[in-house]
Amino acid sequence: MASIFSRIVAGEIPSYKVAEDDRHYAFLDINPVAEGHVLVIPKREVDYIFDLTDDEYAALQVFAKHVAEALRQAIPCRKVGMAVLGLEVPHAHIHLIPMQSEGDMDFRRDKLTLSPERMAEIAQSIASKFRKTPLQ
Ligand code: 5GP
């Protein structure tokens, strides 16, 4: 059975997409810890991120870097934080979170409740800044 994230990539479950290429997909986390909380995934379904091949892992990180560049332009923040947990969804993913302070990386704190309109607006603003080959 396909993971919930594979079903999102397939379009069977809706998502607020921010970026995509042939091997990767990026979308807003449905329970964000901060505005602009993005998940970046490989389309190939692998549970544990460190089980990706070296090539897949490197490509995922480069794609995440490009998403982070777009995120930083779209959402005012000090830096974009990156985290990998993977305890809930068994499909490798990188969390990218615009940070104002260390507390923005606290996954135990109450999640934000944003309207569908706000989620769509955030996703669109990140997507509009996304470039596959930004700063080298
Ligand atoms: P983790 O596996 O890294 O511990 O957490 C999984 C993350 O995926 C959580 O932050 C959760 O809010 C997010 N998530 C779980 N199901 C969905 C979903 O169906 N759609 C989206 N956009 N995010 C999800």
Image (cartoon, rainbow, N blue to C red):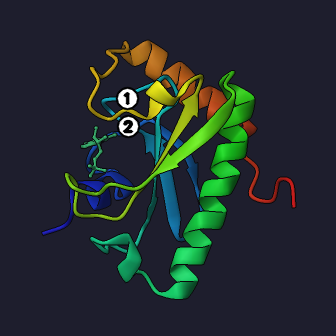
Q: In which quarter of the image is residue 101?
A: top right
**What is the three-letter code of the residue carrying label 1?**
Pro
Report whether 24 appears left or right of 71. left
Quadrant in which the C terminus appears: bottom right
- Across and down, in percent, residue 10 comes to 34, 58
Q: How many labels does the image show?
A: 2
| Mark 1 residue element | loop
Q: Quadrant of ligand 1?
A: top left
| Residue 49: mark in rendering | none
Furthest residue toward right = 136
- Across and down, in percent, residue 82 comes to 52, 48
Characterize the local packing of mark 1: few (<14), some (14-19) or many (20 or more) Cα atoms within 10 angstroms.
many
Residue nearest the viewer, comparing 76 with 12: 76
| Mark 2 residue element | loop
Disc 2 Cβ-to-ligand 1 distance below 8 Å: yes
Residue appearing at x 27%, y 71% in the figure: 47
Q: Mark 2 points at which residue?
A: 29
- Across and down, in percent, residue 76 comes to 69, 21
Residue appearing at x 38%, y 37% in the figure: 29
- Across and down, in percent, residue 130 comes to 71, 44
Mark-to-mark CA distance, 1 and 2: 5 Å
Furthest residue toward front = 102
Disc 1 Cβ-to-ligand 1 distance below 8 Å: yes
Q: Quadrant of residue 74?
A: top right
Report whether 130 appears left or right of 38. right
Quadrant in which the N terminus appears: bottom left
Q: Name the residue under label 1.
A: 32
**What is the three-letter code of the residue carrying label 2?**
Asp
Proximity of marks 1 and 2: CB atoms separated by less than 8 Å? yes
